[in-house]
Amino acid sequence: MQVIFIGKWLPGYTKLCHPEPNLSQEAKLRLKWMDYYRNHANNASLTCRYFGISRKTFYKWLKRYNRLYLDSLESQSRAPLRRRQREITPIQELKIIQLRKQYIRYGKEKLSRIYQNIYGETISSWKIQKVIERHKLYYHPQKAARIRRKRQRSFQKKRITELKQKRISGFLLQIDTIVFYWNNLKRYILTAIDRYSKIAFARVYKTHSSYNARDFLYRLNYLLDDKIENVQTDNGSEFLKYFDKGCKELNINHYFSRNHTPEDNSTNERFNRTLQEEFLRQGNFLLDLQKFNQNLTEWLVEYNFRRPHQALGYIPPINFQAKYLKVLPMYPSSTVA
């Protein structure tokens, strides 16, 4: 019996006889090559130029092409024909896990020798290493716990964009740190400002630990008569651990600025600039921290009680917020150090 392929002379016959809804886009394109090739007198050079492909590629697919099985134009799997099978039996794996837990400080070579002595069979250190990796049987639980806590803390951070702003004194205090150097000495000024009333506070410390940041928070809260609802900080380490615990103890919500977004903390950034221009650059740096904080407090009294603020209609912050929030007298030792 003779079989005649009409499609050899009838353009598009292959498509009519073999619909291609299940073909991939690549296979459909290759089918277009074949149709073009048949419709142009089997001219391979013309087909290659038209589709911009090499003759080698075209002939490879022409050789594979079967009119009755269009799947022949699909790309073949490149996975190896023979794949490596798992070489560790479930019983071996269970034994390795038990040994690893019992001798958590031993390396894979020692565990291999112990395995051989106990069970009377040889097992490679490579297999032991694979089991350790698969079940994460590492000796550093403290390190893993620290990483886990850090990730959880990062995940739980509340961003300032989540807070619906209110134009009320005490609703949001922005807190930041100024780092400055003087004759190879490094000092840290923690600063805070009420986003609405512009009441500000600052204090210098030798270190920027979270313990000192918590001390600053206590002083700030005392100054504002326990009327702080929310605080906003950047993502520095000084605003974690003890500082965060202090927020919880004082029932203050702690929000974080977004990374690399200074406009989130713009009010405090402007206060920091004013403090540097009107206090630090006027020669008010002293090595004695107690005296330094005394001078800083005197400047804060000037800033809060007498200095006109353009954003407040050229009145001092204390006058602006008087009807909202009580502010206790300012002096360096408002709280226990």
Image (cartoon, rainbow, N blue to C red):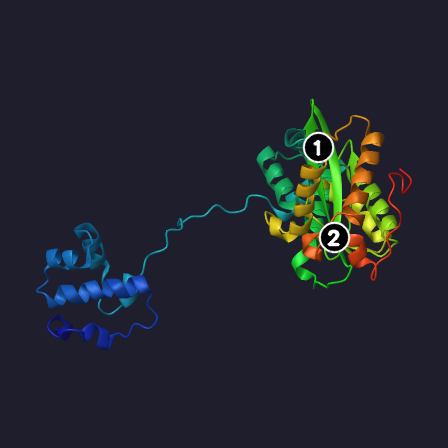
Q: In the figure, 119 relative to 313: above or below?
A: above
The image quadrant of residue 44 is bottom left
Question: Residue 201 location in percent, x, y?
Answer: 79, 45
The image quadrant of residue 158 is bottom right
Can see residue 133?
A: yes
Q: Quadrant of the N terminus?
A: bottom left
Instruction: Say what amino acid the circle numbered 2 marks.
Output: Lys
Question: Residue 179 location in percent, x, y?
Answer: 69, 35
Can see residue 3?
A: no
Q: Which residue is mark 2?
A: 198
Observer-nearest of 224 and 306: 306
Observer-nearest of 221 and 272: 272
Disc 1 from disc 2: Cα separation: 22 Å
- The mark found on residue 147 in the picture is none
Q: Is residue 55 left or right of residue 209?
A: left
Residue at (32% x, 58% y) in the render: 75
Residue at (76% x, 45% y) in the render: 303
Task: Identify the secondary structure beneath mark 1.
Answer: helix
Instruction: Say what amino acid the circle numbered 1 marks.
Output: Gln
Q: Are marks 1 and 2 in contact (CB under 8 Å)?
A: no
Observer-nearest of 239 and 269: 269
